[in-house]
Structure formats: C-alpha cells, structure tokens
Image: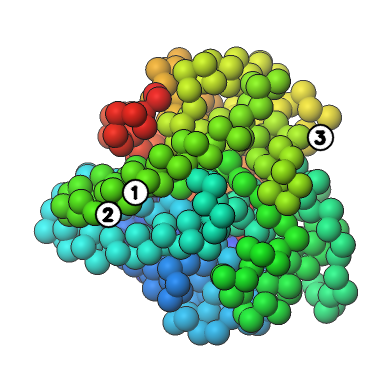
Amino acid sequence: MRMNDFGGYTVPAQGLYPFQWNWDSAIVSAGWAVFDEARAWEELEKLFSGQWEDGMVPSIVFHRPSNTYFPGPDIWGTPQKPSKSTGITQPPVAALSVRFLYEHTENPELAEQKLVSLFPKLLAWHRWWYKARDPENTGVVAILHPWESGMDNSPAWDESMKFPIDKLPRYVRCDLNHVDSCMRPTQETYDRYLTLLHRFKAANFYDPSRLYWISPFRVTDLCVNSILIRANRDLRWLALRLEKDDIVKEIDEWLNKGFEGFKQLWDEDSGLFKCKDQLTGKLANAPISAAFLPLFAGVATKEQADKLTHNLERWLGQVNYGVPSMDPEDHRFEPLRYWRGPVWIIMNWMISNGLRHYGYDELADRIKDDSISLTTKAGLREYFDPLTGDGAGGRNFSWTAAMCLAWLDRPAAIAIGHKMSGPKKHLNA
Ligand SMILES: O=C(O)[C@@H](CO)O[C@H]1O[C@H](CO)[C@@H](O)[C@H](O)[C@H]1O
C-alpha cells in the first residue's frame, strides 16, 4: 500500500494502472483504515476531488501524467474538473468505505468531521446515478461502457458489444507491455471500447443528459446495481447518524424501486441473476460471478438464494479455488482471461459477505479460505487462475492488499461490510 501511494492516492498497480481508479480507491481506503486512518480519509477525499459538478465520480482521475496507460487524459480530453479524468464512472463502493471508516474509527472527532464533508458528495453521486442513468425510472441503473462495470471483459457484454466499430484514430495499447495478451481483452474489444469513448466525447464532452440516449451500449449490470443498493444501505445508515430524515426517505425510495427493478434480472431457468441489455430487452446469456451479488445487495429472496447457492456449489465443485468469474462448465470459460474465468478477491469478498448475511456460513467460509490460500500461495496479484491457483495480471496489486487487511485478516464481525442494514422490509436476508 505504501509502495503504491502516489501522494494522497493509491495507484492500483504501478505501470499497468498508474492513476487513481474509482472503486479500487474506495476499497483501498478500507485497507488504509486498518493501520492509518488519516491516510484512509485522504484517499476518499482525493477521489472526490475529481467529482464532476453534476455529481458523477469518474472511473479514473488523472492527477499526474504517465505514459504507461492507454487511454490517458489526452485521449479522453475532458475539461479540467478540477483534475483531468475519464468521462464515465465505476461501481459506487465509496459509501461502504465511509461507513467502515466511521464505524471503526479510533478518532471519532476526525471521523465526524470527514463524514460531514464527504456525505453531500456521496449523496450527489448516488443522485447522479438515478438521474443520469435511470431517467426512465425503472429502479435499476444503466452502464454505458463495459469499463463502468469494473468487469470490463465479461462475456455478459458480448452480445451488447456487437455494434459497428467506428473509424478510429490510430492508437497503441499499453496494457500488453505489462501483461500477456492471452490474459487481456482482444483487439476487437478494444476497438469497441474506443468507439464508445469517441462517441461520448463527441456528445458535447460526455454530457450526461445525452449519453444515456445516444449510447449503442446500454446495459443493466449486476455488479453496479448490487453495489449501488448496498451502498444506499450504508448511505442511509450515515444519513441516520447525521439526522437527515428527508434524505433517509429519499434513499428508502431508491431501495423500494431497486427491489422492484431487480425482479426483471432473475432468470428462473438457470437459477441465476443475469445482466440485461436495455436496448434489446434481453437478459445476457452469461452465467457470471456477479450473478451472486444480489446476495450482497440483500435483494434476493430466500428461494432465489437457495437456487444461487446450488449453482455456486456446482461451480466450486469444478475448480480448486473459488469463485471463478464465469461458470467453469460454460464453453466460454477461460481460466486466465480477464473477467472470463479468473478469481478476483474483491468479488470473493462481496459474494462471501452476501452469503453470510443469508446464513450460508459454510460457503462463506469456504470462499474466504480460498481467498487466503490464493493470496498466500501467489501473493498480491490482480487475479488468480481458479484451477491452478497461480497469480495473474498485475503484481503488487493495491486492492488485493486492502482486501487482506480489511477482510481476510479480520474476524467477520469487524470486517468491511460486516453489517447489512436498512428497513426490515428491505432485508430479505
Ligand atoms: O483494464 C483496464 O484497463 C481497466 C479499465 O478501467 O480495468 C481494470 O483495472 C481497473 C484498475 O484496477 C479495475 O478497476 C477494473 O475493475 C479492471 O477491470
């Protein structure tokens, strides 16, 4: 963590990801909290220093230049706001971290002060999600780029990414200088990432009121939506501390709508939740590990939870280390390629945490134990091969380190996300 500290923000991995990434930083701040609280708050403040006027918190904030990542600030070309950044966002984990920091603080005065200054920023971001990404009031929000999901290369996007590729300015990828191409997205996938970027840039520099309507990629993603619901629960908990009753009511509305919205993502045939293409109305035919995240959100019914765990046990029976990012029996499963098979410790944390809330302690423990085995065996890698346990992708990876500190090294009762709160009717778990 100290090694990747670039001065108030932590890069996910040197070289490969040399800027401040949004959901990485939120998780990393929970790791800092375990041994340097002031630094933990600073991480979040630095992230929110990149917040846009309309409330969006960008997926990457480019605090200082680097030529080891593509696409960097010159390609994104966003106006200085106040730092340069991307024009898209990432899963809203930050409210979870603020609650974790606040609840476990050894310096209540500092925590109170930071909460008061960060709360309106968190609220503005959550409001942005509903305004900019659910203008049709469905209860669930849209992502407009695979990078927004955090699971960039997931097979869940394969169908929705079949839009025509635009004529692009010539470009050179940097990721392949750091990681073997067999682990990264294909060239065609990158062309589509870039097509979206350039179309959004042409829409008056990522104007949020236009992007939703013009994007050829518009998907209801399980990862963002589950995290948003869980983050709403923590934002509500924080609003209660600050005695902001009107805001509690506003959040309850989001939770009510969210419970309804998630119903359209359940696929009874497979016993899994699925992402949904909003433009075709079809569920994505891809059994991915985010299917289990509605447990983390607390929106799955008991019956759904039973079916999910049945599937999860089958998946775990096929690998040596869980949880693979896609069903290992699916023909598209690739144990080493980005989001198409490998294990991510942050996904394990969310799945294990959700299972525990639903009372599946044995499975929750198994996933935690696998995560300990993987990080012990292979080190702090970006992700891991579920068959061999080998590490892959970036090395000395910040959020993997943070997960060791804030989750794996701690008893469940004080780990990040130990408590799922909210009104009784919103607690299926
Ligand atoms: O592949 C990339 O270039 C970037 C694009 O944002 O995405 C990967 O790395 C990020 C930093 O660790 C993570 O936040 C994402 O979840 C992960 O998929």
Q: Which mark is residue 383?
A: none
Point out residue 42 in the picture as x, y percentages from the top left corner: 32, 65
Which quadrant would residue 186 be assigned to in this image?
A: bottom right
Dot in front, 3 or 1? 1
User: For mark 1, what is the residue?
Assistant: 251
What kind of element bears circle 1? helix
Q: In the rendered structure, which disc, 3 or 1, sits on the residue that comes first in sequence?
A: 1
Rounded to the nearest angstrom, the CA distance separating label 3 from label 1 is 38 Å
Which quadrant would residue 73 be assigned to in this image?
A: bottom right
Residue at coordinates 65% horizontally, 22% vertically from top-left? 268
Instruction: Left or right? Give the position of 103 relative to 384.
Output: left
Determine the quadrant in which ligand 1 lies.
bottom right
Q: Nearer the viewer, residue 375 or 256?
A: 256
Q: Which mark is residue 247?
A: 2
Rounded to the nearest angstrom, the CA distance separating label 3 from label 2 is 44 Å
User: For mark 3, what is the residue?
Assistant: 332
Instruction: Left or right? Give the position of 269 relative to 107.
Output: right
Residue 100 higher or lower than 192, as above or below: above
Rounded to the nearest angstrom, the CA distance separating label 1 from label 2 is 6 Å
Tag 1 near tag 2, CB within 8 Å: yes
What kind of element bears circle 2? helix
Task: Tell me which amino acid carries mark 1.
Answer: Ile
Residue at coordinates 60% horizontally, 35% vertically from top-left? 264
